Image: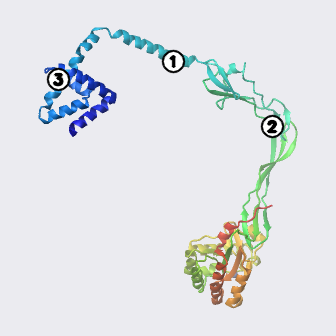
């Protein structure tokens, strides 16, 4: 049963359900006339083209099980063709050619007509935003007789933009589908978009006498942070003389941009505070790091190049534990009191020492004693210094104050955007470490987050110039 069922299913898929039904009737009608002895070729045809119906299959399957299935199938199939035979012969004897030729002729006429219609039918155009219909093979020039206006040429202008002569600028343009065309005998196609555009204005010939304009280095504002907020460039201007108008005017060819140092006190929206430690690294640096780790606090260490060279592993530990390593110059000299060349060397040597020890190349610095001139800002290369940080909470921890006194200064003066000055080098720093162990949790309990100088600048960038 199941094997025959599958057999039926596959035929049904070939013939479709309606064919299945009609064959069922044919099979039944033909069966009584069936006889043995028809050709094998026809039985093959029958198996392919005439799916056996469901009820016949069921009957057949019972025969099949008894071992006579092949004989039965042949018999049944032959019966099918016997019934069709006379009809097929009558059709072959008549002329099949006449209707075929008629169909072919009708097809040729239809296809040809469709082709001709498409070739010669009127075309839809959009001409200066208006939908219009034109005969096939219309050329651009034909549109000017009805729907297009000759585009105006531009005007000739003096160097100051006033009109010298109307209509002596660039010629007007004709655009087809957005592309300018010069050949107006061009044939248009269905759905083409045609536009006319007024010609561009043209400026009179002129001569320029150019000269450079030097960029200035300026400083604005006041505060604990100084940031190179704009790196400028020189400009170029010209005295321009119009050859037709005789007009003379100054024009800017390249706008000069000033270099700007902005001094400001950061004012972040959140309660952020920056702890900074100067004059390290030293033998106390590791203990400072332990306190910072205890409260998961990140600080900024302004290190001296000579100390970094002496204690490179301490310097590296600062960087490796996620703190910001910045420069406090090489040998803690008063930079305003030495030559410009020596001041530059102080920054350069410190930058090199810090990079050697930590892999960090910093352009963030703090001048020793907080003394720095605008003259130094102008002469020290930007590759060495882009940010200088002072402080606005001075703990004076270097004066030997008690841990409680240092803590009180920090806690009482704390404010959002504050920069706290402490030291991890330059002397005995046990009191500073004890003070931090008290002040940090106190400020954290008041909602402060400790950030590095880089993070503070990012959270509160220099205000834009007025
Ligand atoms: Zn210092």
**Which residue is label 1 attached to?**
114
Q: Which mark is residue 40?
A: 3
**Does label 1 or label 3 sit earlier along the sequence?**
3
Question: From the image, which quarter does the N terminus lie in?
Answer: top left
In terms of image quarters, where does ligand 1 lie? bottom right
257 to the left or right of 60? right
Residue located at (22% from left, 32% from top): 57
Asked which secondary structure carries label 3, the reply is helix
**Does label 3 or label 2 sit earlier along the sequence?**
3
The quadrant holding residue 249 is top right
Query: Which-is-in-front pick, marks 1 and 3?
Result: 3
Instruction: Give x and y (percent) for residue 313.
Output: 54, 80
244 to the left or right of 67? right
Instruction: Give x and y (percent) for residue 365.
Output: 68, 73
- Asked if labels 1 and 2 touch by Cβ distance under 8 angstroms, the answer is no
Taking the view exactly as shown, the residue that stands out farthest to the left is 67
- Spatial CA distance of label 3 from label 2 is 98 Å
**Which residue is label 2 attached to?**
205
Q: Is mark 2 within 8 Å of ligand 1?
A: no
Question: From the image, which quarter does the C terminus lie in?
Answer: bottom right
- The answer, for residue 279, to whether it is visible in the render is no
Asked which secondary structure carries label 1, the reply is helix
Q: Is residue 181 above or below residue 429?
A: above
Residue located at (72% from left, 84% from top): 409
**Does label 2 or label 1 sit earlier along the sequence?**
1
- The answer, for residue 413, to whether it is visible in the render is yes
Query: Which-is-in-front pick, marks 3 and 2?
Result: 3
Q: Is residue 3 above or below residue 91?
A: below
- Spatial CA distance of label 2 from label 1 is 59 Å
């Amino acid at each position: 049963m199941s094997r025959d069922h599958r057999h039926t299913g596959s035929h049904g898929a070939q013939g479709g359900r309606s064919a299945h039904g009609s064959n069922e009737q044919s099979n039944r009608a033909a069966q009584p006339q069936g006889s043995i002895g028809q050709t094998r070729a026809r039985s093959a045809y029958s198996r392919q083209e005439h799916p056996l119906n469901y009820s016949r299959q069921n009957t057949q399957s019972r025969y099949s099980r008894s071992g006579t299935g092949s004989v039965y199938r042949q018999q049944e199939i032959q019966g099918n063709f016997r019934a069709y035979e006379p009809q097929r012969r009558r059709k072959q004897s008549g002329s099949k050619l006449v209707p075929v030729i008629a169909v072919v002729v009708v097809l040729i006429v239809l296809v040809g007509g469709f082709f001709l219609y498409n070739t010669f039918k009127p075309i839809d155009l959009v001409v200066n935003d208006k939908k219009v219909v034109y005969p096939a093979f219309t050329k651009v020039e034909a549109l000017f007789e009805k729907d297009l206006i000759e585009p105006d040429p531009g005007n000739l202008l003096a160097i100051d933009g006033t009109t010298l002569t109307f209509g002596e600028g660039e010629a007007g343009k004709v655009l087809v589908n957005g592309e300018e065309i010069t050949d107006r005998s061009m044939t248009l196609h269905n759905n083409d978009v045609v536009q006319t555009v007024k010609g561009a204005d043209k400026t009179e010939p002129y001569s320029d006498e150019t000269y450079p304009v030097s960029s200035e280095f300026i400083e604005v504002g006041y505060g604990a942070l100084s940031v190179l907020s704009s790196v400028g460039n020189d400009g170029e201007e010209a005295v321009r003389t119009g050859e037709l108008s005789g007009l003379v005017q100054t024009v800017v060819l390249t706008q000069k941009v000033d270099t700007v140092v902005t001094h400001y006190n950061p004012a972040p929206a959140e309660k952020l505070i920056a702890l900074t430690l100067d004059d390290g690294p030293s033998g106390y640096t590791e203990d400072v790091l332990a306190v910072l780790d205890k409260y998961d606090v990140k600080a900024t260490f302004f290190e001296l190049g000579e100390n970094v060279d002496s204690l490179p592993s301490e310097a590296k530990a600062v960087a490796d534990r996620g703190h910001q390593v910045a420069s406090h110059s090489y040998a803690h000299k008063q930079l305003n009191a030495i030559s410009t060349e020596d001041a530059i060397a102080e920054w350069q040597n410190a930058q090199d020492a810090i990079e050697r020890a930590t892999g960090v190349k910093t352009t963030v610095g703090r001048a020793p004693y907080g003394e720095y001139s605008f003259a130094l800002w102008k002469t020290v290369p930007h590759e060495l210094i882009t940010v200088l940080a002072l402080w606005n909470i001075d703990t004076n921890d270097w004066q030997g104050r008690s841990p409680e006194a240092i803590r009180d200064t920090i806690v009482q003066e704390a404010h959002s955007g504050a920069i706290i000055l402490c030291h991890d080098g330059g002397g005995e720093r046990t009191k500073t470490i004890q003070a931090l162990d008290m002040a940090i949790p106190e400020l954290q309990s008041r909602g402060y987050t400790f950030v590095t100088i880089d993070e503070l600048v990012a959270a509160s960038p220099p205000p834009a110039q007025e």
